[in-house]
Image (cartoon, helix red, strand yellow):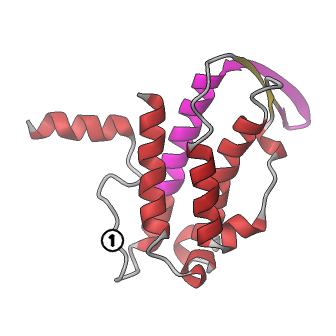
Amino acid sequence: MLIPSINNSFNGLIDLLNQLSDEEYSKSCFELSGSSIGEHTRHIVEMFQCLNRNYDSGIVNYDKRERNVLIQTNGDFAIQMILDIKNSIAKENKNLELQQIIDGEAIKIQSNYYRELLYNLEHCIHHQALIKVAVLKFENVTVDGNFGVARSTIEYRNQCAQ
């Protein structure tokens, strides 16, 4: 269920990106405190890429992302990166070690691949919610009602509707 949910989120993001020009995609947005839709998309993409790239070593540090400017300025390139992720995330669960420096202190935390996929999905949805706020000003963009909405909220809404 996890991989289909991630793919679902990515499909919604791809649908949205296909509606934006590169100018709209990369333009600074007041609603995003001056960042762009592209910057938020790049952040989503690079978190998944970081997890994927470090799967074999088993050591993940999200602070050591690539930060590829092309992802935040070129919608077609971003879509290709999303498709690459979709094609590479179905892997066996295994133990991972998360590493990060917080307030100058090195932190190491045990996790596993599925837990990190779930974290990245929730993180993706959070950034999609922010992106949704920015695109609502575009009259020519259609956004699915569930875009940027947590899966638990969607399930709750479905239960209430019955």
Local SS, label 1: loop
Q: Judge whether residue 156 is colored magenta.
A: no
Q: Judge whether residue 106 is colored magenta.
A: yes
Give percent across and percent down for residue 116.
Answer: 62, 29
Occupied quadrant, residue 98: top right
Task: Determine the residue positioned at 59% across, 84% down.
Answer: 23
Please report the bounds of the magenta region as a residue range: 100-128
Give percent across and percent down for residue 53.
Answer: 77, 38
Height in image: 27 above or below 123? Answer: below
Q: List the residue tagged with mark 1.
A: 142
Residue sticking out furthest to the left = 162
Query: Would you call the spot at circle 1 few (<14 residues within 10 Å), some (14-19), or many (20 or more)?
Result: few
Task: Determine the residue positioned at 58% across, 32% down.
Answer: 117
User: In this rendering, does residue 33 appear at all?
Assistant: no
Task: Determine the residue positioned at 70% across, 44% down.
Answer: 49
Give percent across and percent down for residue 7.
Answer: 46, 43
Give percent across and percent down for residue 75.
Answer: 59, 71
**Residue kind at label 1, given as amino acid type:** Thr
Residue sticking out furthest to the front = 87
145 left or right, relative to 31? left
Q: Report the front residue among 35 and 26.
A: 26
32 left or right, relative to 111? left
How many numbered circles does the render carry? 1
52 left or right, relative to 153? right
Height in image: 115 above or below 35? Answer: above
Q: Quadrant of the C terminus?
A: top left
User: In this rendering, does residue 147 appear at all?
Assistant: yes
